[in-house]
Image (cartoon, grey):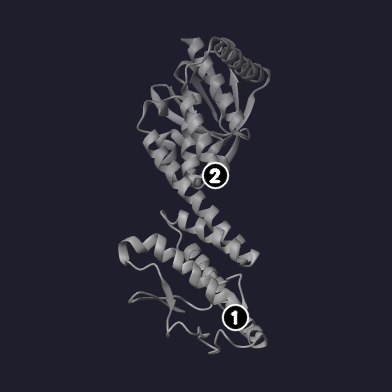
């Protein structure tokens, strides 16, 4: 549709997209709207004429496809309505396809700064009647993008957190761990925070009640060992660091409890070693430099390594080390506690 204002022409698409009017009055309604736009919005700045005339001597307005004039019979205008509806439906389908393509391309290239674009595309898709499955896929992509953004922000925050004094406080680490878990941060980030928290809990100063409980626990460990050693011996598996064999050993105490008597092999009564209790130093075998350097120890399974104990001693002016393997890490720890308490008591 081409309209004239003085010597100026304004071209509009015909038919008007999704225009509610059909038939004979369509052109007149559109022209009236353009008239109002030119006179009110542009007339004062663009031209001095307020009269809007139809082009081609303002006699007829022809459909760009059918070529029918405004003065044709009503039946022919009905055919024009059918054609207009068909074209509008085709345009609407093309419009929907374009929106679907925009959703797919935006979802596949989601990055920082594209969130608002995706939101607007989803809103437009809902209004245009795009398939619900397409919209759900786009919403899922948007949610995943938001999660990824939040995850990256929190992981950066965690790195900066370790540079602050709060990283040395269990309360601060707990708060940071909760935030990281809520943001679904990577496993290595969560593991680092959990390890930091565990270390702070273990190394923090004990409260008075905890000190009392610890002393009671140590006394129980020592008492259980002494009772077993005096009653007939406390058995343990010894790892021979020369040939890698595992043999059943037995530990007893002399009456004054000044010497630990270790029978290195229960089958051989002559394989006894008398060790002054005051020289005993018990540690986890995995932390003893001499033991971990032996190929016999390296050949152990991981479960045995976790339960192994290294016992350093000095007897007859010679230093040595024995390696025992307990059934569980807890049994190993209780044996270490008992031997440590005995050594302190002898001093």
Of residues 298 and 40, which is closer to you in this image?
A: 40
Q: Determine whether 104 is above or below 332 in the image.
A: below
Rounded to the nearest angstrom, the CA distance separating label 2 from label 1 is 80 Å
Q: How packed is label 2: few (under 14 Cα within 10 Å), some, or many (20 or more)?
A: few
Q: Where is residue 282 in the image (x, y as percent from the top left)?
A: 49, 25
Q: Where is residue 271 in the image (x, y as percent from the top left)?
A: 55, 30
Q: Where is residue 241 in the image (x, y as percent from the top left)?
A: 48, 40
Residue 157 visible to the viewer: yes
Q: Which residue is drawn at 65% across and 18% down?
A: 224
Residue 284 visible to the viewer: no
Of residues 73 and 127, which is closer to you in this image?
A: 73
170 vs 85, left or right, is left
Residue corresponding to mark 2: 302
Q: Determine whether 178 is above or below 18 in the image.
A: above
SS category of the residue bearing label 2: helix
Query: Looking at the image, which residue sits at the far bottom?
Result: 67
Label placed on residue 217: none
Q: Position of residue 151 (x, y in %)?
A: 47, 46
Q: Residue at x 56, y 58 (%)?
A: 123
Which mark lies nearer to you, 2 or 1? 1
- Answer with mark 2 or mark 1, whichever residue precedes in sequence: 1
Residue corresponding to mark 1: 84
Q: Determine whether 236 is above or below 64 in the image.
A: above
Q: How packed is label 1: few (under 14 Cα within 10 Å), some, or many (20 or more)?
A: many
């Amino acid at each position: 549709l081409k309209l004239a204002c003085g010597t100026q022409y304004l071209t509009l698409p015909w038919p008007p997209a999704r225009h509610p009017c059909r038939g004979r009055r369509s052109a007149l309604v559109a022209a009236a709207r353009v008239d109002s736009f030119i006179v009110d919005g542009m007339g004062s700045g663009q031209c001095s004429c307020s009269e809007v005339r139809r082009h081609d001597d303002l006699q007829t307005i022809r459909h760009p496809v059918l070529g029918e004039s405004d003065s044709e019979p009503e039946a022919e205008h009905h055919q024009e309505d059918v054609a207009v509806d068909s074209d509008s439906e085709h345009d609407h389908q093309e419009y929907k396809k374009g929106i679907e393509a925009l959703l797919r391309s935006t979802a596949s290239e989601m990055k920082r700064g594209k969130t608002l674009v995706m939101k607007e595309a989803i809103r437009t898709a809902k209004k245009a009647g795009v398939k619900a499955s397409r919209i759900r896929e786009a919403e899922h992509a948007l949610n995943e993008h938001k999660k990824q953004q939040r995850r990256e922000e929190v992981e950066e925050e965690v790195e900066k957190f370790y540079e602050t004094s709060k990283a040395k406080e269990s309360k601060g680490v707990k708060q940071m761990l909760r935030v990281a878990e809520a943001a679904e941060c990577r496993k290595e980030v969560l593991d680092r925070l959990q390890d930091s928290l565990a270390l702070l809990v273990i190394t923090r100063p004990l409260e008075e009640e905890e000190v009392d409980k610890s002393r009671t626990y140590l006394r129980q460990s020592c008492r259980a060992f002494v009772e077993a050693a005096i009653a007939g011996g406390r058995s343990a598996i010894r790892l021979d660091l020369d040939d890698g064999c595992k043999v059943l050993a037995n530990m007893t105490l002399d009456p004054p409890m000044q010497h630990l008597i270790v029978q290195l092999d229960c089958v051989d009564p002559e394989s006894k070693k008398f060790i002054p209790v005051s020289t005993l130093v018990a540690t986890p075998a995995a932390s003893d430099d001499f033991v971990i350097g032996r190929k016999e120890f390296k050949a152990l399974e991981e479960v045995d390594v976790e339960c192994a104990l290294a016992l350093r001693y000095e007897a007859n002016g010679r230093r040595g080390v024995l390696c025992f393997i307990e059934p569980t890490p807890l049994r190993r720890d209780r044996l270490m506690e008992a031997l440590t308490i005995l050594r302190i008591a002898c001093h």
